[in-house]
Amino acid sequence: MEASTLEPLGTLLMQLGFGGGIGFVIGFALKKLLKIILVLLGIYFVSLFYLAHEGFITINYEKFSELYEALTEKLLHGGFTVPAFLTSHLPFAGAFILGLGLGFKVG
């Protein structure tokens, strides 16, 4: 085979390897970061409920409910779209998403 016929294959393999590697690293770090954020968020809410129970503060539960409903409405009815860079470079995006999933599972 000539070098010119192997060039697209080499580019494809490079995109798959790089995308998968970057996706794995980002997925691993994202899971670790989300764990830290969720622990801090849990501590925050527990402290809020404790302060409300002791009478130091009052919590407007209707406002919490409105905020939650608005967020779920946006998530369920297409508030977020796939970025254009993911659809323009399909081999890279596929490997990136696979690597992201594996990194998230391992992390």
Image (cartoon, helix red, strand yellow):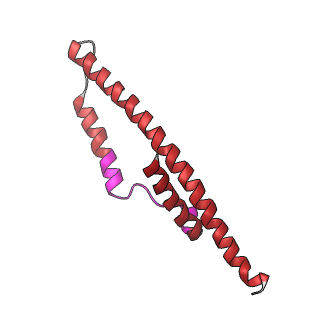
Which residue occupies 59% across, 54% down? 22
**44 or 28: nearer the viewer:** 28
Image quadrant of residue 64? top left
On whether residue 5 falls in the magenta region, the answer is no
Is residue 61 or residue 83 the one in the foreground?
Answer: 83
Q: Quadrant of residue 84?
A: bottom right
In the rendered image, the residue lying farthest to the bottom is 1
Task: Tell me the quadrant of the picture where the N terminus can be found.
Answer: bottom right
Taking the image as shown, residue 23 lies to the left or right of residue 52, namely right
Q: Is 30 on the left or on the right of 15, as rendered? A: left
48 above or below 14? above
Between 25 and 77, the residue placed more toward the observer is 25
Q: Is residue 73 magenta?
A: yes
Residue 44 position, x and y percent, is 35, 25
Residue 84 appears in the picture as rendered: no
Pinpoint residue 2: horizontal percent, then vertical percent: 78, 86
Q: Is residue 23 above or below residue 94?
A: above
| Residue that appears at 72% across and 80% down | 6
Q: Is residue 53 left or right of residue 73?
A: left
In magenta, the rendered stretch is 71-87
Residue drawn 59% across the image and 56% down it = 21
